[in-house]
Amino acid sequence: MSLQLNALKVAQTQVGQKENPVGSNWGEPVKSYLASVGISFPASWCMAFVYWCFRQATKDPLPLIQTGGVLRAWNESKKNRVIGEPMAGDIFIMDFGKGLGHTGIVEKLDAAFIYTIEGNTNDTSSREGIEVARRKRPRNKIKGYLRYL
């Protein structure tokens, strides 16, 4: 099985995990997600969650950029970019401008939407939420995808 499908399986085990206290960008397991990218303080954690999932999926060296920054991961991963058709396990990238982004892992897709597992989201699909959750996102709102087979 590929690295990205193994990472997706890890992400599926984390659905429902929340910040503690809620709204703090902290507490277990969020501290572990952030620590995986070298962050030891409360911070936005969607990219750290993705990195943590990939780290848990293999003992081998990771091809991912070790960062908590969504747009840094995109900008520094030029050879792994997929602008077109996503597949399960791809990392989706959203860009809201002014250095703000959001990310997660594609679980499945159809013609109009990707269905994802994301950290630091909520019931309204915020990029600054409180939990790991499944979301449905319009494909036309996605900047691109990163693929690590």
Image: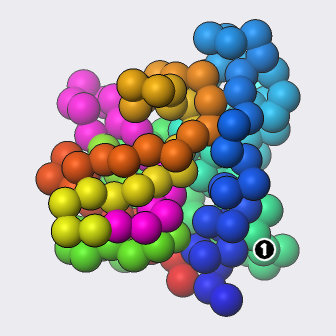
Answer with left or right where residue 71 lies relative to residue 15.
left
**118 relative to 11, above or below:** above
Question: Which one is nearer the viewer's eye here, 11 or 31?
Answer: 11
Q: Which residues are magenta?
A: 95-109
Answer with left or right where residue 10 lies relative to residue 124.
right
Q: Main secondary structure of the magenta part?
A: strand
Q: Residue at x 45, y 62 (%)?
A: 106
Residue furthest bottom in the image: 1
Answer with left or right where residue 90 lies relative to residue 110.
right
Amino acid type, callout 1: Thr
Q: Which residue is mark 1?
A: 58
Mark 1 surroundings within 10 Å by alpha-carbon count, few (fewer than 14), some (14 through 19), many (20 or more)? some
Q: State whether residue 122 appears in this view.
A: yes
Q: Is residue 102 magenta?
A: yes
Answer with left or right where residue 78 lies relative to residue 55.
left
Q: x and y percent of residue 96 in the render?
A: 24, 32
Q: x and y percent of residue 9 in the render?
A: 69, 67
Q: Quadrant of residue 8?
A: bottom right
